[in-house]
Each structure stands twice: as C-alpha cells, then as structure tokens.
Image (spheres, rainbow, N blue to C red):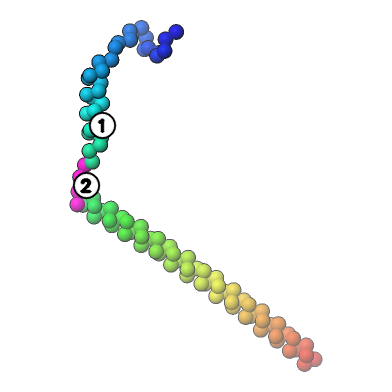
Amino acid sequence: MEDFPRAGNAPLRPIDSAAFHKKLSTDLTFTSQKKPESRELQWFLAGSAAAAAAAAAAAVVVVVVVAAAVLAVVVVVVVVVVVVVVVVSLLKLSL
C-alpha cells in the first residue's frame, strides 16, 4: 500500500530539493515584501476611519436622545398619575 496517492499510473518522481527550496524562498521573499501604500490610499483609509468615528458618535447621540425622550415620557406619565390621584383624593374628602 502506498503512502501517497498517485494520479493514474504516474510514477513517483524524486523532488529536486535545491529547486524546491529556491522557489520556496523566492515565494516567501515576494509575499513578505509589502507594497508601499499610495498617498491616495492613506487619505482614503483616514477618511474611512473618520467616517466610522463620526457614525459611531452619531449612533451614541441617537441613543442618548431616544433615552432622554423615553425618560421624559415616563416623567410625564408619573406626573399625570400623581395629579389624578391627588384630585381624586381631594374630591373624596370634599364629599
């Protein structure tokens, strides 16, 4: 039984280790080199980061405004309930 499957009846060939290591080191050298980023790309990335920060700040402002509106509604409901209770109790006392 073979350790490695073969395509069809192709014989196993020995690997030319020198050529393999040369190609591998060339590939690794090429992929490890970073291409310098253009000035336009840097400006675009900075603009994108600023837009994301502005969107996050806008989301926080929306959350705060909605929370304040909900709190205002709750306060109004509580005040109305207290006024109704006081008026009803005063009417009961007057009768």
Q: Decide which of 32, 73 is in the foreground and name it.
A: 32
15 within the magenta span: no
Name the residue rendered at 47%, 70% in the picture: 65
* Residue of label 1: 28
Label 2: element kind: loop
**Would you say the residues marked 2 and 1 are in contact, meaning their CB atoms lie under 8 Å apart?**
no
Q: Which kind of residue does numbered mark 2 sit on?
A: Glu
Name the residue rendered at 50%, 68% in the picture: 66
Relative placement, left or right, of 95 versus 58 is right
Label 1: element kind: helix
Using the image, determine if residue 10 lies above or below residue 69. above
* Residue of label 2: 37
Question: Mark 1 Cα within 10 Å, few/some/many (few <14, many 20+)?
Answer: few
Q: Decide which of 55, 29 is in the foreground and name it.
A: 29
Name the residue rendered at 28%, 15% in the picture: 15
Magenta-highlighted residues: 35-39
- Residue 19 image offset from top left, x and y in percent: 22, 19
- Residue 17 image offset from top left, x and y in percent: 26, 18
- Residue 42 image offset from top left, x and y in percent: 24, 52
Quadrant location, the C terminus: bottom right
Which residue lies most toward the right here?
95
Relative placement, left or right, of 42 versus 54 is left
- Residue 36 image offset from top left, x and y in percent: 20, 45
